Amino acid sequence: MNSMLLLTRSSLRRQTLHQRLAQFSTQQWLRRLVPGRYKHYRSPLRTFGLYFLLANLMVSCRSNGFVWNPLEMSGWSFFGFYLLLNIVLFVVIVIGQVKICASDRRRSPVTPALTIYEMARLTDIDKSSSEHEVLFSTVITKLLAQGHIQLFQPMKNGRITGSHKIKLTQKSATFTDPIEQLVAQTIEKPEVAADVMKTAVSGQLKSMLQPMHDRMQQLNLLLHPAVERKQNDWAQFIFSLSGLLCLLRVFADISRGQSSWWFSIITVFVFLIAWVLGQDSNRLNDYGQEVLVELKKKRQALDHSNLNADELAMSVALLGPDILKASTLSELYLFLKPVEPEQSDDDDD
């Protein structure tokens, strides 16, 4: 009995020792090398390891004279194969991301109460708008409907000389909302055009939107950071396979003394796209999509020709600035989306 107990203890000790050695060899050295940031480098290093194994496999196939080897194809044959591969990779990315997104099943028992600007930000996220177009239009609509700003057209000698401009009717310091104050400070500059305002505001809004995103995360409307990171890693890894293949083709052409500048350009371009795919953030989960669709349905049933300031701004936040064409603020639509004047036949002569 004692001998069996001793054997069991010794086997457990050996098992524990093996586990510690494995853990040290795979994780501890990295934690010591980059203390406190291991979680940020774990996925890229795992991805690099897979790339390295695939590269060895491709080179091995080439050296063994594999019958169907992309590295031995002619330029146009490889290009056709490469396009087909990218189509397949794109489908794999989409299918994988849909499944990963579906794993975030968080929901709120009650439909969350959102502010007007949070609704506008949800719409921008859904449209993947990096310029915060809907949020910008919503702020302008609310301020104009409340009489805090005015639209005008520059005139000279009784004739209109330009498109719509916008000006404040009060000091920007009187606004309490930080987003409204930012827009008001931009409007204080004389005769600011819409495109100039969007560029100036969108560059400063990023840091101001983080509290809004934190609240949306608490309301379970955005993808969980872990799920979002997994989605980005998946897209980055899969699409980087395209860049890896092109990179191997560049090395193969160089070894044969052939020109490789065209494939070199494609390689750099593909890796840049893969890097961008891995940087995407703040996306709606399935529950956030459902909440946004439900909110939009309620607004679409309304008559937008006669709404108060808050209601009209809420409609713009959910449905976009196009609804302004049928409202009392139709001039604002021309300011937000100016139409280029058509040249007449006389001008051509």
Image (cartoon, helix red, strand yellow):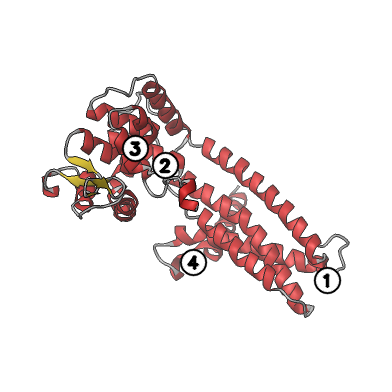
Q: Nearer the viewer, mark 2 or mark 3?
A: 3
Residue at image point 41% right, 28% down:
291
Residue at image point 33% right, 56% down:
203
Residue under label 2: 125
Residue under label 1: 63
Above-or-below relation of 320 to 241: above
Q: Residues within 10 Å of mark 1 (few under 14, many from 20)?
A: few
| Mark 2 in CB contact with mark 4 (< 8 angstroms) | no
**Residue 30 in view of the camera:** yes
Q: Position of residue 149 (x, y in %)?
A: 19, 41
Q: Nearer the viewer, mark 4 or mark 1?
A: 1
Upstream in sequence: badge 1 or badge 3: 1
| Mark 1 in CB contact with mark 3 (< 8 angstroms) | no
Q: Position of residue 83 (x, y in %)?
A: 72, 54
- In the image, what residue type sits under mark 2? Ile
Residue under label 4: 30
Closer-to-camera residue (129/52): 129
Instruction: Give the spatial CA distance, label 2 vs label 3.
Output: 22 Å
Secondary structure found at label 2: helix
Upstream in sequence: badge 2 or badge 3: 2
**Residue 217 in view of the camera:** no
Residue under label 3: 333
- In the image, what residue type sits under mark 4? Leu
Residue at image point 85% right, 60% down:
68
